[in-house]
Amino acid sequence: MKFHETDLPGVVLIEPDVHRDDRGFFLETYSEERYREGGIEGRFVQDNHSRSVKSTLRGLHAQVERPQAKLVRVIEGEAYDVAVDIRRGSPHFGQYFGARLSSENFLQLYIPAGFAHGFCVTSPVCQLEYKCSDYYVREAEIAIAWNDPEIGIAWPVSRPLLSDRDRDAPTLAGLGERLPRYEG
């Protein structure tokens, strides 16, 4: 198993060992001990599963109070998955890292607390699963504009399918003091 640091400290791209043969494949998708050795600490308390059609864009989402770290993987299809540093005062504020996660490459993305998460489906259908380090709390969640020019994400779709909430989400600048503070 390989843990690849990204340009955003704390965001890690994980390449599991996949054992293939004529019958199919086997891989370990999570092991607390191995992930801790790879620099990913903490416990996960909730698993989420999403199914979406091509061009669906979900995000950018984060919980401000009770922030969640996430461990994301695709089990069917492909998605462009993104982490954005939204911590006020961070030297990487507003910067993002994106990666193509698929059921073929088995890559996983670890997104620490204090980062927003979003993804765009690039295959006909995509099923995405992710572990969360805290429980979902609707009142604690924020949405950030998927096309915020301050972030400048190069999404692989020009006309995404969006929820009303994502379509009407404010920019980072519009959220101001609501954003989490960088603890250094």
Image: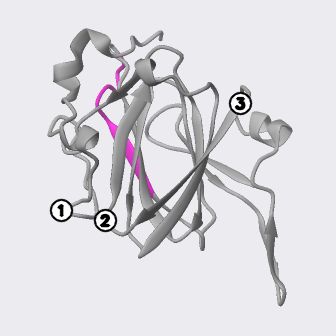
**Range shown magenta:** 90-99
| Secondary-structure class at tag 3 | loop
Q: Is residue 160 above or below residue 115?
A: below
Residue contact at pointers 2 and 3, CB within 8 angstroms: no
The residue under the point 27% across, 57% down is 155
Whole-number angstrom distance, CA of label 1 to CA of label 3: 34 Å
Q: Is residue 71 magenta?
A: no
| Secondary-structure class at tag 2 | loop
Inspect the image, locate mark 2, and give the three-letter code of the amino acid beneath it: Ser
Camera-side residue of 138 and 157 = 138
What numbered label is drawn on residue 117?
Answer: none
Inspect the image, locate mark 1, and give the three-letter code of the amino acid beneath it: Arg
Q: Which residue is mark 3?
A: 45
Based on the displayed image, in which of its 4 quarters is residue 87 positioned? Answer: top left
Residue contact at pointers 1 and 3, CB within 8 angstroms: no
Residue contact at pointers 1 and 2, CB within 8 angstroms: yes
Going from the N terminus, do you reach mark 1 or mark 3 first?
A: 3
Camera-side residue of 162 and 70 = 162
Q: Which residue is mark 1?
A: 159
Q: Is residue 91 magenta?
A: yes
| Mark 3 nearby-residue class (10 Å; few <14, some 14–19, many ≥20) | few
Going from the N terminus, do you reach mark 2 or mark 3 first?
A: 3
